[in-house]
Structures are given as C-alpha cells and as structure tokens.
Amino acid sequence: MTLAEHYTSMREAAVRQLAHGAADLDPLIDSLHDDRRGITLLARPPAAITTVMEAMLADFRRIDPAQYYYPASDIHLTILSIISCYSGFTLRAIDPDAYRATVQTSLQDCRAFPITYAGLTASPGSIMVQGFPQDDGLASLRNTTRRIFQSSGLQQSIDQRYRLQTAHSTVIRFRKPLANPALLLAVLRKYEQHFVGTFEVNTVELVYNDWYQRAPNTVLLAKYAL
C-alpha cells in the first residue's frame, strides 16, 4: 500500500464513523491535570506552510468552533516519539545530555529532505494534513535514529504504540460532539486533495512535550541542522 493509499484508507474509514456523529472525543484535552509528557524528535513547517493550513482550519472553525484547533506554533511533523507521553514523566527521570548526544550521533550522516503537504486525511478523533516525503531522507533518519536509540540502553519507547511511517501533521482534535457532521465532511472533501506546499526539512528539534505539543508546555532540549 502506498502512502497515498494509506491516507485514503484512513480517511474513508473515519468518514464512515464521523458521518454518524460518532467522533472519538478526547477527554483530556482540556484537563488541567493532564501530566502526560514525553520526548520527541520533530520538525516544524515554516510560516508559508502553516499560513495555508490555518486558512483551511478557518473553514472548519466557522462550522464547528468548539473543536481543538492547533495554533501555528504547535503544528509539527513527528520524526520519532522517542519516549511516548505518559503520566508522571519528567526530565528528572532521564539525563537530557545523553539524549542530545544520541540524537547527534543519529544525525551524523543524515541530510535535509523535502516534504510535500497536500490534502487532508482523518481518524475518528482528528483531522490531519497529509505529508509526502519526496525522497528517502525521512525514512533514513527514522531508521538510523531507531537503531541507535534501541541499542543505547537509554529509556525509550520507539514503535511501542505503532511504527511511525507517515508524515502527517495533526491540525484538529475532536473534543466536543460534532456540531454538524455533514458540513464537517463537506469541508473535509473540499480539502482532501488541496495542495499546501513543499518545504525542506533542514532543522530538527529534540523536545520535552505534552501530548498535544503545546508551546507553553514544550522544552527545547536541542536543535540540529541537517
């Protein structure tokens, strides 16, 4: 299955559920007591890309403002979840310098790579912008980082939830019952093939983060040029 086919399959399965108003609502997104934290290697699309995304989100916000919309500051492309978020995890549980050094080792032979964002896909709980790697740079970076961390002896949970193979960016999460499923799906269809833009990932960040990558809860541990 190609990446495009995977995104289409995801969207079609989600549409069947969302059409009945049966969104998977996130019960923790507004919780003041959500202490899930983790360590992530990620990339951030530039303003030229997030501006287009935010214009798309404005259409959804007009028909269903109660949902959670990612601000431009929080939109990201996950390279790898090195430690998936879990309750009670803090930086005191690890040696951040060891993680910085391990990522640096992982990136020694990696190069910048292009990502094209085009169209939307969905899950029962979210809407995502589809990302398409234009060469093998992302896959190579992920595979090298997986291999080095899994042999490092450091705490990590890479691939324990699922093996990350896509290049999407989550932009909407459902936190309230859908105001109008038919209208929401109409907007989804409007943008399901919409070209957003292409950018070169030439910088990646190692961050301590919450589940939603909210900027106020994010600690930048290191930034690396590719």
Image (cartoon, rainbow, N blue to C red):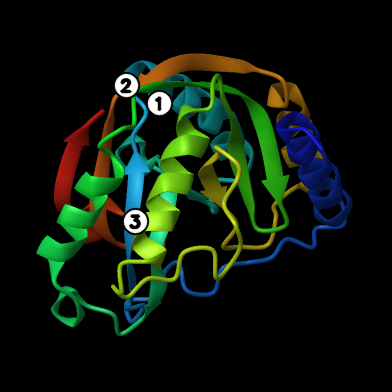
Evaluate if marks 2 and 1 touch, with contact meaning CB atoms under 8 Å apart: yes
Residue 165, by quadrant, is: top right
Q: Residues within 10 Å of mark 1 (few under 14, many from 20)?
A: many
In three-dimensional space, the C-alpha distance between marks 3 and 2, rounded to whole angstroms, equals 21 Å
Type of the residue with mark 2: Ala
**Residue 83, position as x, y percentages in the image:** 37, 68
Rounded to the nearest angstrom, the CA distance separating label 1 from label 3 is: 20 Å
Q: Is residue 114 visible?
A: yes
Residue 220 in the figure: left or right of residue 14:
left
Is 187 above or below relative to 68? above
43 sits to left or right of 183: left
Which residue has dot 1 on it?
Answer: 50
Circle 1 sits in a helix, a strand or a loop, which is it? Answer: helix
Q: Secondary structure at mark 2?
A: helix
Q: Is residue 183 visible?
A: no
Residue identified by numbered label 2: 47
**Image quadrant assignment for residue 46:** top left
Name the residue beneath numbered marker 3. 40
Quarter holding residue 85: bottom left
Could you tell me the amino acid type at mark 1?
Thr
Q: Position of residue 75 (x, y in %)?
A: 39, 40
